[in-house]
Amino acid sequence: MCGKDSEASSKMEDFYELELNIKGLNNLDESLDDYLTLEELNGENQYFCDSCGKRVDATRCIKLRSLPQVLNFQLKRYVFLPKTTTKKKITSAFSFPRWLNMGTRLSNPSQSGLIYELSAILIHKGTAVNSGHYVAHIKDENSGHWWEFDDEHVSKLGCHPFGEVSNSKSHTKAQLAYSGPLESASIGNLVDDNLHTSEFHALMQEEFFSSTDAYMLMYNLRTEKENKDNLNKINKRDLEARSNSLPSYLYEEIQTLNASYASACEEYQKRKDSQVAYITERREEVKLVLSKAPADLLDDSYFWISVEWLRLWADSINPPCIDNSELQCVHGKIPIAKVTSMKRLSNTAWQMLFSQYGGGPTLTSNDVCADCLRDEAKNAVCADDYRDRKASLKQLAEAALAGNCPDGPSYYVSRAWLVQWLRRKNADFPCPTDAGPTAPLRCSHGNLLPEQAAGAKRVLVPESLWIFFFETAISSRSDNLLGFSTFSSDSEPCEICSRELKEVACMEDCLRASKLKQRQNHEKLVTAKTFALHPGCKYFLVPSSWLAKWRAYLTATGKNVSTCAEPENLEVIIDSLVCQKHSRLLERPLELVCKRGVITQKMSTTDGLVLITVMDWSLFCEEWNAKEDKGISAEIVVLSSPAIKLSGSCDDMPISDEDLDHSTDEANDGLEARKLLIKTYPETCEYCIGERESCELMRKLNYCDEAICVYLVRGKEVPKSIMEASASASEPDRRTSKRSRKTSFGNSVNLRVSGTTSIYQLKMMIWEAFGVVKENQKLHKGSTEIDGDSATLADKNIFPGDVLWVTDSEIYENRDIADELSAQKFDSRQAEEGFRGTLLSSDVPIHSFEDT
């Protein structure tokens, strides 16, 4: 040590706030001692001295030369964890006083003392560093009361910064009670008289506060002998504003706003009085008119008015003109049917309304429409006649439906129409449907449809009933009477339609005969029954998908006949199975099964090639116009050498003639112990098949935003239904719900994931859905446990529609998911407005001190 100060020691730097450590410290006094303590630099931490030109032992500390009017303390509640490279919040309690003497903390201690009073506390609520909520507790300098500012909400706390009675977990009550605010003048008097008197020490130790969430403290300077002259230079205008509890500019602005508000209130009151007066006048008008409205029963001079307009007039502030147009009939008068939509008014009431609102037309007691009255009476008579005639003819209609038509002239009507006519109840008038009793029986040529046509079922009705239908059709005033064609009992069906129906029937008979013949020719293939295969015999291959369509086409009945399409051309399908590049097969035959010495082939309706007999292939070529020589032939070989692999494997190993001869001779000798091979002509193209499967696998792995189902299983036993669903193949097109549902064994939820989603991310989603921490999750697909947090779902063969199940080991203690999310290496969320420049929004601390 050379005893010299470093060059940096002579530099003065300003500071925004003092950043104080609180980890392991209990109060503000201990943190200030830690902040200003002398640090020794020795050993590996020696200081390089420019004067000595070498590393030497040295000391370093921070010295405060002067303090501002407002002193801010930044409490370091957030520490950096090197192991996880994340930050963590310190939630231990930290106490601080109401009054703070900073005079002894200066490098040149002040004899007069620097007395600061607590004026604001900034609080962070929450356990995570990158999230939470911020509030501020601020003291009113004039009243001494504290206020809490929580976004747009402001609450009064009283004389205590945390409220008079507080149950909050973020702080405790003061250690010593305080009766009320202490004026600044009393502090000044105490300091001016004697800084070290017992009264002053009692004042300094009177009240302390404690909080687990406070991260910034603000203190205001109350008195300082060195600044007395500056305090006396405050201008008169500011002193007057202070005496009025507000600054002058703010007081003037409030006065202007108050005057504007008073003017607006006065204007509003004037408009309100005017509206109230008008509404009162309207009410009196309504009462007066309604009192004069009843017309004398013996007086024949009265007026009609619309009920709808009368209701609108009574309920509206500004009623429209009188509108009686909706009451008039086509003759310009009042129909009897509108009697429920109008009211009678006396002459006095009508004149009052008409003179005030005008409009019209004027409808008097003499404007009742006689023509409409006669029409109504005529319709009533016709309705009675129609109802009576229909009742008398009902028995004839029922007898006609039963096939009992009396002798004499008769006519055809639609059976379905007649049934509906009988079912109609409470029908007093003809309806438009009464005009078409023969419409379904009339063909496009205007003639009678053959009875074999769809919807052409008919019945014979007697002439009396037919005449009633005819008269009803005319009186129904239907715009279309073409449907009322007359077809007597001796009418012949349309020859053209009969010929067309016969042709269609002939084609359907041929098609049915063709299908029947194919079912008889391919009895085992139609029923999808497996049949025994024999080594050395020749077979042919067809796609299982084509065979499934062919089977559905042959067995379709009823309504399914029209919806079941004919399978594709067999020859085209066979040609599509051979690749153009290598002239080899693009599909593999389905696997063989040997059980109890009988060789059969597995069945499928979607993938692979199916073996059929030579006879079936020959008949298929004849039935579906295919060439026999274009077929894909195959034979079954029993391999004696275990090194030869099954057909369809990726390894293309040649088979010698000796192996084939030897396998044929020993075909029936221990088949279960040997390997079976389907040798095809041409051979399968493993290159093209592998390329296609690779593309399909890549497409399957690169899924995005698809749904999988996760079950939370409670208990030791996993339900069989979940195990089977989890072990089965995924169904990408299956519709899934986003809703969680609860079952007897636990909960289930559908999660949206992608192929690149990691197992860690999936466990975080499960944690959020079920509340099970990721360390306690035992995740399974079927009977296989899924491990490795860094692996993706595609790596673990988890695809859309898969069902997973998870159990809770309950080994590790539960904790808040927010802590885990904040510890992830994601981009930090933006700090709240108003807190920029603090340690909450920056990883770089702001130091303002002097090095020595």
Image (cartoon, rainbow, N blue to C red):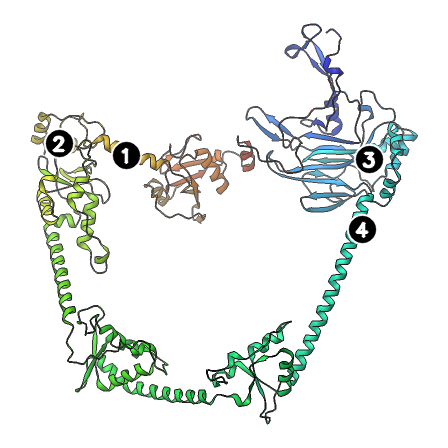
Residue 767 position within the rendered picture, expressed as x and y whole percent measured from the top left? 49, 39
Is tag 3's residue or tag 2's residue first in the polypeptide sequence?
3
Give the labeled residue for mark 3.
206
Asked if labels 2 and 3 touch by Cβ distance under 8 angstroms, the answer is: no
Q: Is residue 442 visible?
A: yes
Quarter the N terminus occupies: top right
Vertical placement of residue 164 versus 663, above or below: below
Numbered disc in front, either 3 or 1: 1
Position of 384 with respect to 309 (left or right) is left
* Mark 3 → mark 2, Cα distance in angstroms: 102 Å
Vertical placement of residue 500 versus 795, above or below: below
Q: Quadrant of residue 372?
A: bottom left
* Mark 4 → mark 2, Cα distance in angstroms: 108 Å
Residue 269 position within the rendered picture, expressed as x and y whole percent measured from the top left? 75, 64
Label 1 amino acid? Glu
Give the labeled residue for mark 4.
255
Give the labeled residue for mark 1.
693
